[in-house]
Image (spheres, rainbow, N blue to C red):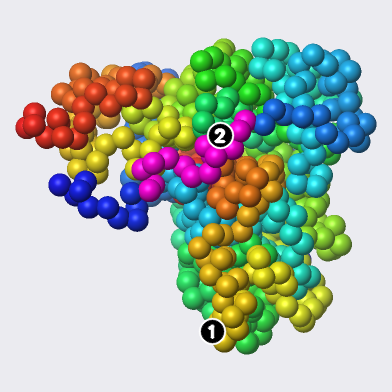
Amino acid sequence: MATKTVEFNVGQSREMGVGGAGASSPLAPFDIPEPKLGSEQMLINIGPQHPATHGVLRLVCELDGETVTSVVPHIGYLHSSFEKLGEYRTWNQIVPLTDRMDYLAPLIYNCAYVMSVEKLMGIEVTERCKIVRVILMELDRIFGHLLWLGTTAIDVGAFTPFLYSFQQREKIYSLHEALTGARITTSATRVGGMMADLPEGWLEQLLEFLDNFPKTLEEVHHLLTGNQIHIGRTQGVGVISAADAINYGFTGPNLRATGVPYDVRKDRPYYDYETYDFEVPVGEHGDCYDRYLCRMEEMEQSVSIIRQAMARLPDGPINVDDPNISLPSKTDAMSDMESMIHHFKLITDGIPAPEGDCYMAIEASKGELGMYVVAEEGGTKPVRWRVRPPSFVNLSVIPKLAEGHMVSDLIMINASLDIVLGEIDR
Amino acid sequence: MADEQKSGLDAVDEGPIGSDAHEATEPAFSGDPSEHPSVAALLERFGDEVQGHRVAAGDQWVAWLAPERSHEILEWLKNDPDHAYDMMSDVTGIDYGAGRPVEVVYQMFSTVHRRALRLRCPLPLDAMEIDSVCDLWKSADWLEREVFDLFGVTFKGHPDLRRILMPDDYAEGHPLRKDFPLRGRFSRAEQTRRALEQDVERFYLVDDLQAGAPQEMSASPVGAITDGEAEATPAQAGEDD
């Protein structure tokens, strides 16, 4: 039902002639002559401490009247030198650094990092672990998109979707807490498996969330998708063509909104994503509205993927059965001499890696998240640990997107990119 | 002073562990290049420039290139329809330490052929320069700025090469280089003192706000650092007070 409404509105908007920065707004279909006003160039500084910048981002704008002639983003206010810190930590000690980057979808980062290290070391994780990670990554995709939905709606004046989405986010917080003991800084993964298996009753809790969540999505659809104010603020705003989007490095829903069906889950599949039945939603105009529609549809697809993954979740061990990689159980470490030695060696030395490098790209909630690890022969710490943050590259496009728009559109464009400064500044 | 006390954390000031213990390994030719059309074509067309290739992590192809003609080769890889690497996913650097060359790494992906390729260009420490690929892929803009900021690699022809994560007036070098100590070049007290001495207002002066203009540091009372050598040690700075 929801998708029908979507198509109807997109079609309707096109009749109104939306599709470029100069198009008339559906709110003002008549030609109102522009009043001739004198204007002068001015410089406006937005941020770094400003709610509309979605983090400690600073935008220096050059304005002609109210029209943006150029934007220069300044970043680095949240720089924590995670990549440098990683060079002094063993493979498993880096996991807590990863969820502090994208704290809006921490489990995706946890999983992506260990997947890269496992690929470098040639570790094949258990089937159960793979599927649990798929569930967690899709759950956090919803988690990240929900925050985007709420805060972006607030930026264009819609307060209610914010409340709805945060109500659902709270349920995912509870799921995080039940699984890892933490709500945001989850640190749930380990090289070769997970910190712990799913706790009892967790899947039932997840199922309850999945049952209720689509209703919220539908409510938000009713509130925003056909809302003329929302359409007026988003359609034709921040348009980018497909070829430009690829050249500028757009990934994730931002790229798909331009009509390019590039999804790492489909194009470079990992964890058997090719066997799951899901669709990659693409837009056609590459504007803020299409980005909104793509993310809304992606959440529904994620629900479907989680259901499929839950159906095929096997029993069995969650960690690989190799004492040189996975920690022994606490009981064994306390009672069995050999297990204790393994425990000691793993904690004090860490896991030795082969010489080489590995770039693991996965589809995070914001786009292509690349984890690049470089190791030397037998190294228990990385020589280089590089994170390719999707928001970093997405944000670099903002000067192009915002040029010629109003200041208020700049706020919408910035919000529609779905950035998180934790991963941009690292 | 606290310097007398030894703690377990002192080791972190001695530079990254593990890097120095290994000899520099020359990139070798391994793997069968006919498995990856682009690597095979690179060898055929730019055989002299390719310094090595191998398969990393099971299925990822890596090729080492000499930096001199890297722009020409990357341009060809982007524009040739048989390769069409239209997406520059990542540009980053690697510093192994121990005098080994700093490498610039390109992660490329072709949405046409669904094929990925990684190129690594080793730059000797006395010539840390490479041509910018910003004119080919706009995504390289900020990525190259980051490599410049954190590794000190100069990208020739970059339209706006300035620091991006560190402050514009950061004078202590390039943090991701192995010779940069984890905790910075100064004690925490000295770092705080420098931060407090900064004129906060200047970040919001109209002259400094000008779009794209790097913020010039006014003459600092504490000596700026050149070539990574600390001229003002914490002890000396304390005496000045």
Tell which of A235 and B47 is nearer to you: B47
- Tag 1: residue type? Met
- Which residue reaches farthest front? A337
| Residue A261 occupies quadrant | top right
Tell which of B134 and A330 is nearer to you: A330
Residue A155 located within the stretch drawn in magenta: no
The residue shown at (35%, 25%) is: B228
Whether pointer 1 and pointer 2 mark residues with C-beta atoms closer than 8 Å, the reply is no
Query: Residue B218 vs residue B49: left or right?
Result: left
Residue B233 versus residue A147 in the image, above or below: above
The residue shown at (69%, 17%) is: B66
The residue shown at (61%, 77%) is: A339
Q: Are marks 1 and 2 on the same chain?
A: no
Residue B96: give its label.
2
Residue B16 located within the stretch drawn in magenta: yes
The residue shown at (67%, 12%) is: B68
Residue B227 versus residue A176 in the image, above or below: above
Pair 1/2: label in front = 1
Picture coordinates of residue A268 (x, y %)? 79, 47
The residues colored magenta run B11-24
Picture coordinates of residue A77 (x, y %)? 37, 41
Quadrant including the N terminus of chain A: bottom right
| Residue under pointer 1 | A334
- Tag 2: residue type? Tyr
Crowd tier of the residue under label 1, counting other residues whose Cα lies within 10 Å: few below 14, some 14–19, many 20 or above: few
Q: Give the prevailing secondary structure in the magenta stretch.
A: loop
Picture coordinates of residue A49 (x, y %)? 33, 45
* Chain identity of mark 2: B
Q: Secondary structure at mark 2?
A: loop
Picture coordinates of residue B43 (x, y %)? 85, 21
Query: Residue A34 vs residue A26: left or right?
Result: left
